[in-house]
Image (spheres, rainbow, N blue to C red):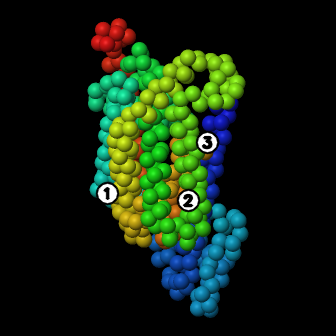
Amino acid sequence: MKKLIGNLVRVLVSVGILVYLFNNILRDETENALQVIADSPQAPATELAGSLQLTVAQVEQIRANCIVTDDTKDSGEAITLSKLTRSERLPLVWRIGPQHLKESFQRVSLVWFALAIAAMGVVIVFTIFRWQWILEVQGLRLSFWRACSITFVGMFFNAFMLGATGGDVMKAWYVAHETHHKKAEAVASVIVDRIIGLLGLFVVALIMMGIFHHRVFDDGRLRTFAFITLAVVATTVAITIAGLWKGAADKFPGIRARLQKIPKYDTLRRMVDAYRVYASHPAVLIKTFLITIGVHIFSMLAIVCIGKGLGITQAGLVDYFLYLPIINSVSAIPITISGFGLREGMYVAMFSRVGVLGAAALAMSLLGYLATLFWSVVGAGFYLTHRKELPSAAQIETEN
């Protein structure tokens, strides 16, 4: 029940943030359209109505209510929606705003979007190799195809299940089924894979913020996010070290006795022991960490491709590589479902620093999600076929 309520709250937060973003962006787009009318007091109403997707009556209504004259134009006075009544304002916002937002999506080049999808495909291949290396530490060996299949099944559930860990749970379930004699170790591999991915992301964010520290400290908002990222990194590292510290529970009186009362304590203990095995394999940790850096570089390149496809010229490569690690680090905090809403808000907030319009930034974020969703949909095919291919427990016993 608590989990259901938690997920419901996160859905409501996601929807609330998205509604707030859309409302602000639609208002901005409508304000821009009104200013076009203000800047063209002599233009025929029919001409403006056609270019702005309005009716002639609406154009004339705006001119009459906002008193667009040569005098107001020369004075530089901007037309704002506050000059209209609520009954006049809402139809304009929901007529002009969505149309302009739709145009932002329609501008994307299919070639650049295809390149973004391909870059996300490279990301997935890297994560499969990383997971295989992590599994091998536990003496578990899956073929590339089997690891690929399970990874895609996890992606499918991550995209379509409530909660941030739905895909990881399914991924752990599948690999535990295939390696039933080492279920705890299989689950530990999924946890370690996620931790290394997060640490790699945080390190990339810190490196970029360090390189461009002058921009970070000159911008109050960036500075705030920098401190948030540092706090998250410190917490993650502390938890990771505590998990690797053998006998940590015995250092505190009564902790061991309380832990033993937890249901399935033996399984939990085996998972912790499996997790600690990685401390004695520094070469594997270094190798997986380096490929994780490649994962994040290609995921950022995917967004760069989408930005190019949308015709965004205000943001340069440096801006993408500075903002995206910060956006992804903050979005990784499990506040909303799969980072929805929070991620889009971060895109709008960050890229507005270099003059990218809210509608374009929102389109970039959503198209980036669609590029990932493409592979999640592919995962549906793996889900439908993978279960039929699962070997029986007797076959696994024979093979091992």
* Residue under the point 52% across and 26% down: 272
Helix, strand or loop for disc 2: helix
Relative to 350, 123 lies left or right: left
Vertical order, 273 against 127 (above or below): above
- Label 2: how many residues lie within 10 Å, few (<14), some (14-19) or many (20+)? many
* Residue under the point 28% across and 29% down: 145
Q: Which mark is residue 226?
A: 2
Which callout, 3 or 2, points to the residue nearer the camera?
2
Which callout, 2 or 1, points to the residue nearer the camera?
2
Tally the numbered discs: 3
Indicate the position of residue 8 as horizontal and vertical percent values.
64, 37
Q: Are marks 2 and 1 in contact (CB under 8 Å)?
A: no
Indicate the position of residue 309 as horizontal and vertical percent values.
35, 61
Please report whichever mark, 2 or 1, sits nearer to the chain's N-terminal start: 1
Indicate the position of residue 360 as horizontal and vertical percent values.
46, 63
Q: Which mark is residue 112?
A: 1
- CA distance separating discs 1 and 3: 31 Å
* Residue under the point 55% across and 72% down: 218
Hey, what amino acid is under mark 2? Ala
Helix, strand or loop for disc 3: helix
Vertical order, 85 against 375 (above or below): below
For label 3, the residue is 11
**Considering the image in quadrants, where does the C terminus appear?**
top left
Q: Residue furthest front?
A: 251
Relative to 190, 81 lies left or right: right
Hey, what amino acid is under mark 1? Trp
Hey, what amino acid is under mark 3? Val
Please report whichever mark, 3 or 2, sits nearer to the chain's N-terminal start: 3
Q: Are marks 1 and 3 in contact (CB under 8 Å)?
A: no
* Residue under the point 29% across and 12% down: 399
